[in-house]
Image (cartoon, rainbow, N blue to C red):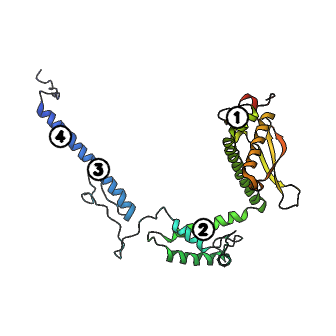
Amino acid sequence: MANRRALAPQPNAENPRMMEEIIAMKQTVLTISNDVGFLKQAYTTMNGQSGTNVGGNTNTGQPSNAGPVVPVAVAPVVSTTGNVLPEPKPKDLTEVIRLIHGYMWTPRFRSNDQAEIEANNRKPRWNTKVFFNDSPNKELVDNLMAFLVQRSRDPRLRNSDIREKVHNHFRSRCHLESQTSSKRDAAKAKTRRSSREGDHLKRRGLTYAKNKAAIDAAMGRDCSNLIQKGAMSDGESGDETPGTPGVRIVHVKRPSWRSNEFNHFLEMVDLYARVDLGNNSRQLMERRFHSVVTKPVPDSMLPPPPQWTVRDDE
């Protein structure tokens, strides 16, 4: 029995001294852990800013042979001349981009002032048929860089940051020039159609709201919630007679699911819209039925259209 090892006493309320020692040990371990984390951060920061290696074995908490490791206060990196090196480049380069656009020629420039148009035509422009670093673009880049460096108000900006924005402007102009005229015209026509149909939908909604009582009485039913984008026709504009300028109409393509009664309702709303506009109705393009496009009842209509608006064969 004399050789039996005594079991370590368990910490409890009857061993207050042992409880105090355990608490103190935990606090010591926490302090050491915090110190190690601080040293790791200082090591990473100093390596990244000055390339200096802060020695030390962070796994064991023991310093290397280079000497004891002490907490290092991170300070701005100072050059050999005593000047503080610039901070990393700012994310906002709006001023540089604005200066570039003001310096360079703007395509499709519009102004009522002839002097402004002539001033824009005198501005330098990119030669999109040669590379960025080839003449005459190379000389243009040098002049533009000198202008931007002189005019830039942010001392943190590096020349590489400014040159990157200049190169982006060149690439953007090349991309614009690479588009064929037919593609540009098609994109503009699509934008005009979308804008025109949006205005037409808004005008129909306002007209029905203003003349709801009269329109509902003529239709013999409540027509609320029918002026929705999903129920409208597609339209394409064009000359009434090819080659005849100034005479333009909208060729309407009706969805196949709409009933004749629903089409009559929309025609009545358009009639009231012209009456409300009076003489200003001349500004509206004439809408003329062109064809029927096979389409199901759109799920986007909320609430769904009532049964009388849908063709029987749908």
Residue corresponding to mark 2: 167
Mark 2 or 1, nearer chain start: 2
Contact, mark 4 vs mark 3 (Cβ under 8 Å): no
Contact, mark 1 vs mark 4 (Cβ under 8 Å): no
Secondary structure of the residue carrying numbered label 4: helix
**Closer to viewer: mark 2 or mark 1:** 1
Mark 4, residues whose alpha carbon is within 10 Å: few (<14), some, or many (≥20)? few
Secondary structure of the residue carrying numbered label 3: helix
30 left or right of 17 in image: right
Rendered-image quadrant of the C terminus:
top right
**Closer to viewer: mark 3 or mark 1:** 1
Rendered-image quadrant of the N terminus:
top left
**Closer to viewer: mark 3 or mark 2:** 2
Q: Give the residue displayed 19% in from the left and 40% down from the top.
A: 25
Residue corresponding to mark 4: 24
Residue corresponding to mark 1: 223
Tag shown at residue 36: 3
**Closer to viewer: mark 4 or mark 2:** 2
For marks 4 and 2, give the CA distance: 62 Å
Q: Number of labelled discs?
A: 4
Q: Give the residue displayed 60% in from the left and 68% down from the top.
A: 167
**Closer to viewer: mark 1 or mark 4:** 1
For marks 1 and 4, give the CA distance: 81 Å
Contact, mark 3 vs mark 2 (Cβ under 8 Å): no
The residue lying toward the viewer, choosing from 55 and 5, is 55
The residue lying toward the viewer, choosing from 188 and 265, is 265
Residue 40 in view (yes/no): yes
Which amino acid is tagged 1?
Cys
